[in-house]
Amino acid sequence: MGIFSRFTDIINSNINSILDKAEDPEKMVRLIIQEMEDTLVEVRSSSARTLADKKELTRQITRLDTDSETWQQKAELALSKGRDDLARAALVEKNKCEDAAQSMNDELASFDDHIAKLQDEISQLQEKLADAKARQKAIVMRGKTASSRLKVKSKLDSGKVEDALSRFDRYERKIDDLEAQVDSYDLGKKSLADEIADLETDDSVDNELEALKAKMQKPKKAATKTSKAKK
């Protein structure tokens, strides 16, 4: 199983757990980023171990190559001394070293392939992590906004607001009633200013009445003078 396969399984498992517990989006996003960071550390550690193993394998191959050359020299020395038996034994040891070195060289090639894949996975994960961190703030903000709107709508739909406004109207009506009771105590009572204003009104009406009488008497007097003049 590859690094990304394990990472996907971990993320899906945690997301399902969060959804089951109805956790908030901010925690979910933070957890995903944490899992990505932990996976990145794991991949880097794996790469470091692989590189260390490659170096050790390379050292072993070098030692085997050196041993192979040494046995070759020993075989030549034995032959020069007429010891075919020792030369044969030295060549056997030389072949063992060469076979072991060849096997390790094949293993070294697979190390190089594995390291290349790890480096590629690290690059991909770093890009995804950077993208997740860039989107984290926007996702958290959207989550908070949606939660706030949901709370407001749930309260509006619950009828609590309408009930509050209805009580508010009742309180206003009670205050109107209290103010009306206060005003009722002054009904039928005249202040000094009101009585003086009434007197001024009476005087004005009296003056207007006298002026009207005088106006109406003038035509009668004029008619009497005209009648006497004709006689």
Image (cartoon, rainbow, N blue to C red):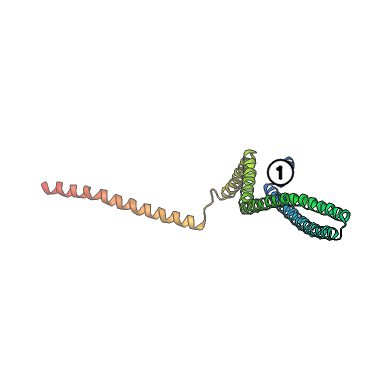
Q: Position of residue 86 (x, y in %)?
A: 88, 56
Closest to the observer, 86 or 143: 86
Left or right of 204: which side holds 81? right
Return the residue found at the far left. 230
Q: Is residue 5 above or below residue 112?
A: above
Q: Is residue 68 visible?
A: yes
Return the residue found at the far front. 82
Q: Where is residue 33 in the image (x, y as percent from the top left)?
A: 69, 51
Q: How many marks?
A: 1
Left or right of 35: which side holds 190? left
Please give the name of the residue rendered at 37% of the width and 52% of the height, measured from the top-left corner.
205
Disc 1 crowd, CA 10 A, few/some/many (<14, 14-19, 20+): few
Q: In which quarter of the image is the N terminus?
A: top right
Closest to the observer, 159 or 216: 159
Left or right of 187: which side holds 32? right
Please give the name of the residue rendered at 56% of the width and 50% of the height, measured from the top-left corner.
186
- Examine the image and state in which quarter residue 126 appears: bottom right
Left or right of 192: which side holds 16? right
Judged from the image, the secondary structure of the residue bearing numbered disc 1 is helix
**At label 1, which amino acid type do we have?**
Ser
Q: Position of residue 116 (x, y in %)?
A: 68, 52
From the image, tell me which residue sits under label 1. Answer: 5
Q: Can residue 167 be seen in this view?
A: no
